Image (cartoon, grey):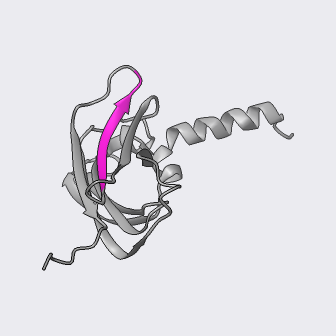
Amino acid sequence: MLFPKRIAIKLLTLTLALFPSVLLAQDAHIGSVRTEFRMLGPNNTIEVERFDDPKVQGISCYISYSQVGGISGAVGLAEEASEASVACRQTGEIIFNPAEVEGQEVVFTQRRSVLFKNMRVVRMHDVETETFVYLTYSTKLVDGSPKNAVTAVHYGDLTPAQ
């Protein structure tokens, strides 16, 4: 017997909600370290990922964040911590179209709980100093966290004045 289309769509939606970190992961997983042993389910870890700025060629960002293990973490029901760190670096020639780069834009999002919590990285463009500033923070439906991290990449001419 085949599932009706409506049931299949509900099952797919539930799967996306339960396993957000697997399905929304972007770019490259660099590595992880165990922070706490769990008898049942995966251990608690700190994960490190890299993503490349989607509109600025030559800038890669590295983010680290905690991942809750155990049974609740394994099925995607754990509420993840709001702490995260970001470090962006020039990894090639910086090329971008100024008309396409907004003054402030979300460049990375990752779901941190089944419902309503996300980690984001926002790129801000400081035109005056020719610098891209990257800020990471978490949001929640009602109240986000003031915990954040910031990094910057200068792209202008670094030739000293004569």
Seen from this angle, which residue lies furthest right? 1
Seen from this angle, which residue lies furthest front? 162
In x, y percent, where is residue 26? 47, 58
Q: Is residue 115 left or right of residue 156?
A: right
Q: Is residue 18 left or right of residue 93?
A: right
> Residue sitting at 60 percent across and 35 percent down?
14
> Residue sitting at 44 percent across and 45 percent down?
105
Quadrant hosting residue 153: bottom left
Image vertical order of residue 157 relative to residue 101, above or below: below
Question: Which quarter of the image is occupied by the N terminus?
Answer: top right
Question: Which quarter of the image is occupied by the C terminus?
Answer: bottom left
In x, y percent, where is residue 71? 37, 41
Viewer-closest of 26 and 161: 161
In x, y percent, where is residue 94? 39, 72
Image vertical order of residue 97 relative to residue 21, above or below: below
Q: Is residue 82 left or right of residue 96?
A: left
Viewer-closest of 90 and 66: 90
Quadrant hosting residue 137: top left
> Residue sitting at 37 percent across and 67 percent down?
59
Q: Is residue 67 visible?
A: no
> Residue sitting at 32 percent across and 46 percent down?
69
Is 83 within the magenta?
Answer: no
Seen from this angle, which residue lies furthest top? 142
Which region is colored magenta? Answer: 132-141
Question: What secondary structure is the magenta-colored segment mainly?
Answer: strand
Image vertical order of residue 104 relative to residue 63, above or below: above
